[in-house]
Image (cartoon, rainbow, N blue to C red):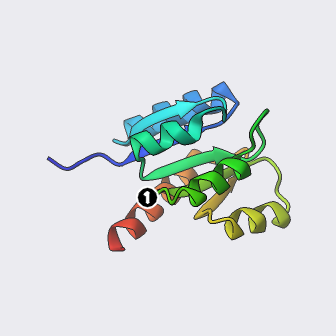
Amino acid sequence: MKAKTRLYLVDDDELIISMLSRTLKNEGYEVRAETTGKGVVEKIMSWSPHVVMLDIKMPGKSGLDILQELKAADVDAEVIMLTSDDTSETAVKAMKLGASDYLIKPFNIDEVKITIKNIVEKRKLK
């Protein structure tokens, strides 16, 4: 039996978490989600997801802070940043810190599916 691709979603917007979780589970992914950055690095490390989707702006700990912690801990997961800030500065900073891609909110769900599919395919080729 083929193992499911594991996705970890971190966004303080419960509506986004709910919509993404439902859609991605229907696509055949195994999904876990958090609405806070607190303690999430340890949870991600213990579950070993293939892809992590992080909201950049969250109360307490930002997605960029979490991304840095994941990279410092050498977590083997591709990271997609979610942002409502469509300036190139934010995207460039996220990519320099090690993000694989970023999506601007509000995003099209088909764009999310394609982005994840492409990242998963790239991982398989490594």
Farthest-out residue, left:
1
The answer to which of 45 and 7 lies nearer the viewer is 45
Image quarter for residue 14? Answer: top right
The image shows residue 56, relative to residue 121, as above or below, that is: above
Q: Quadrant of residue 103?
A: bottom right
- In the rendered structure, the answer to whether residue 26 lies left or right of residue 10 reads left
Residue found 85% across the figure and 61% down from its top:
87
Q: Residue 79, relative to residue 24: is it above or below?
A: below
Q: Is residue 40 left or right of residue 55?
A: left
Residue 113 image point, x, y percent = 49, 51
Q: Is residue 86 above or below residue 36?
A: below
The answer to which quarter of the image holds residue 120 is: bottom left
Q: Secondary structure at mark 1?
A: helix
Residue positioned 53% across, 49% down in the render: 52
- The quarter in which the C terminus is drawn is bottom left
**Labels in figure, total:** 1
Of all residues, the one furthest to the front in this rendering is: 73
Q: Position of residue 101 (x, y in %)?
A: 61, 62
Residue farthest along the bottom direction in this orientation: 126
Q: Residue at x 61, y 38 (%)?
A: 10
Badge 1, how many Cα within 10 Å: few under 14, some, many 20+?
A: few
Judging depth in this view, the residue of 118 and 75 nearest the camera is 75
Q: Which residue is mark 1?
A: 117
Amino acid on which the number 1 mark rests in the picture: Lys
Residue 70: where, in percent of width, then height? 57, 53
* Residue 35 image offset from top left, x and y in percent: 64, 29
Q: Residue at x 59, y 59 (%)?
A: 72
